[in-house]
Image (cartoon, grey):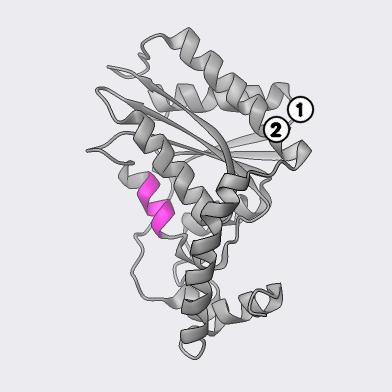
Amino acid sequence: MKILGILGSPRSRGNTAILLEGVMEGARRAGAETRVISVASLDTNFCAGCSHCFRYGQCHYRDDVEKVKEKMLDADGIVLGSPVYIGTVSAQMKTIMDRCAYFIHCFLLAGKYGAAVATAGAGQAEEVAEFQNRFLRMCGAYTVGAVWAKGIGTGKLQDEPEAVARAINLGAELVAAIRERREYPEQAAEHAPLRESMKQLVLESREEYPAQYAHWSEQGWLE
């Protein structure tokens, strides 16, 4: 079982990294293979809004973001981690999300599970953690939970032992959900209207965006 952590903080050893590593530790203790990718260390480009992915099934950039996406598709579980920057995720994390538009249109994370962590110097960490989980659900995944905490100063989480303990428990819960192939009816209900609206979009744009239409057809979702 593979669990992928994506660190969206520009600080490789900051508060978000501490929480994310806690989740990875919990997953490892539960028997999973883990890997963390720090987006700040990668060669990345912003989404150009060119729709190349919808037409051809892949981005026109061949940078490190494409490698991250490959790792996401290869993983059984994905954990996103970001600090709160002006009420939302960091630029690093948002770049990954924006480059995953095709994942959303084609629900490429269906059958996978996810979780999120977030840290903030003041507030809104819970909201940003949920924002990350909502992104994963928009891509088709189920999410098992989130951990958030307050930290002022690099690597200085308040109540660090308790926060890390929660993160370790989340990692174990993620592995358990994957093993049990858990279903979440409330999240399935959340998926349903998005899937229906996306189906209409795919049908209406079949000539312009043949790759996403082909994917939906192969999955039998247009019947």
Asked if residue 153 shows in the view, the reply is yes
- Residue that appears at 54% across and 22% down: 167
- Residue that appears at 27% across and 26% down: 123
Residue extending furthest toward the bottom: 207
Which is nearer the N-term, disc 1 or disc 2? 1
The kind of secondary structure the magenta stretch mainly shows is helix
List the residue tagged with mark 2.
Answer: 175
Residue 14 is situated, as x and y percent measured from the top left of the image, at 38, 24
Quadrant including the C terminus:
bottom right
* Label pair 1/2, CB-CB below 8 angstroms: yes
Residue 8 lies in quadrant: top left
Q: Which residues are magenta?
A: 93-98
List the residue tagged with mark 1.
Answer: 31
Instruction: State left or right for residue 143 relative to residue 118.
Output: right
Instruction: State left or right for residue 49 relative to residue 72.
Output: left
Nearer mark to the viewer, of 1 and 2 = 2
Residue 173 is situated, as x and y percent measured from the top left of the image, at 65, 28
- Residue that appears at 70% across and 36% down: 177
